Image (cartoon, rainbow, N blue to C red):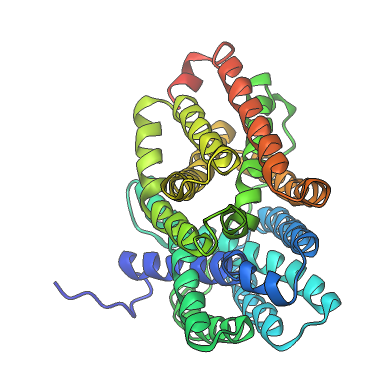
Amino acid sequence: MNINLLDRNNNLSILIAGIITVIIGLGVARFAFTSLLPPMLESFLTVSFAGILASVNFAGYLGGSIFSMFIKDINQKVILFRIGLVLCILSTLVLGLSSNETIWFISRIFAGFAAAMAFVVGSAIVMTKLNFENKTKAMGIHFSGIGFSILVTDLISRYVLSSSNSWENAWIVLTIFAFFASIYAMYILSFDKEVKTSSVKHKFDKSLFTPFVIIVIVAYFTEGVGFVVQATFLPDIINSLEGLEGYGSLTWTLVGLAGIPSCIIWMTLASKYGSINIIIITLLLQMVGILIPTFTNDVYMNLLSGVLYGGTFIGLVGMFMNLGGKLAGSNPVILMGAVTTSYGVGQVIAPLYSVYFIEKYGNYDYSLYLTALIVFAGVLLLLYSKTIMTEEQKRI
């Protein structure tokens, strides 16, 4: 069997280019910041400024995600996708060249917007180009790129830190990696000729927003909160525990490893046992992972907290987005926009309250307590939603 990885219409090429895109968009432009947080806290950043940078990064991502929902033309999507990759590279480069706080602030906003162009728009292009009867499993493989994005950027960062002991050099090496990787992604995720797309106008349909759908949207907000505190601070949370100094980076590596298969596993279970049932179980596991660092400094338990985090948040994104898409039917833009906005608002809020608690109490415990409580509220909402579901919704 002869597989040509330079064939733009080959499913394997499309999936590889999609995963590379996720590594650049979410890994280099977002998760590398978490990986490099401990050395940056030692010499340049404060925890409070890191929290603010995380918040504005997610605000940029939220803005980009909402903007991308309204771009219908696939040819325009390709242009925006390429702009996003270029912005990912440039916004990363400045972190290695400057220590001006204003430049960092602006850079993280642009990095967030660029990540949305790369991930959200890039995923739409992947979905359009894939030639499968059932694309759900293929998109599960694509979303495994989120785990790879954490793992690959973490390994690059750790290698540079071990050889040069300079987080600035790590940002520059990540930029070089993203530049070369983006060439393949841009080449494959485009079309040989302009694609004719018929734009269907959908009116705002209030009847979509049933009590069940509103509960799903609010529950996804709670997961936005549940995702972001560890996404921002996990290595420093682990390093701050007595006896676990230096274990933060290993925990973050395990997040990436656990994340790679998680989407495929959880989405397979969701299709078999019902999305809401599996989402509830996954949220409860995430809650346990969030709370572990607050009650023990046992090394294996805290490594497990990283596995539980990586093993749940990617699967939850896949399951909620899949559920939202099915609930929306033929009118996806408004509902998917509402779902994405809800998650994004949670991402923007959580780093800010975390900073408040960290400054007030001098540790991460209270921000983790509140985060776990909010995730548990999502579980309670979804348990209630099971009492008002239609037979059709139970089958989703």
User: Dividing the picture into quarters, in which one does residue 95 lie?
Assistant: bottom right
| Residue drawn where x is 39% and y is 59% of the image | 130
Residue 334 shows in this picture: no
* Residue farthest toward the top in the current orientation of the protein: 387
Image quadrant in which the N terminus is located: bottom left
Measured as percent of width and height from the top left, residue 11 is found at 33, 64
Looking at the picture, tell me which residue is in the foreground, 83 or 163.
163
Using residue 82 as the reference point, say whether residue 337 is left or right of it: right
Measured as percent of width and height from the top left, residue 103 is found at 81, 79
**On screen, residue 231 above or below 375:** below
| Residue drawn where x is 56% and y is 54% of the image | 238
Looking at the picture, tell me which residue is in the foreground, 258 or 124.
258
User: Dividing the picture into quarters, in which one does residue 170 lie?
Assistant: bottom right
Looking at the picture, tell me which residue is in the foreground, 175 or 191.
175
**On screen, residue 175 above or below 54:** below
* Residue farthest toward the left in the current orientation of the protein: 1
**On screen, residue 340 above or below 287:** below
| Residue drawn where x is 43% and y is 53% of the image | 259
Residue 103 shows in this picture: yes
| Residue drawn where x is 53% and y is 45% of the image | 317
Using residue 217 as the reference point, say whether residue 394 is left or right of it: left
Using residue 316 as the reference point, say whether residue 209 is left or right of it: right
Q: How many marks?
A: 0
Looking at the picture, tell me which residue is in the foreground, 3 or 146.
146
Image quadrant in which the C terminus is located: top left
* Residue farthest toward the front in the current orientation of the protein: 243
Measured as percent of width and height from the top left, residue 329 is found at 55, 35
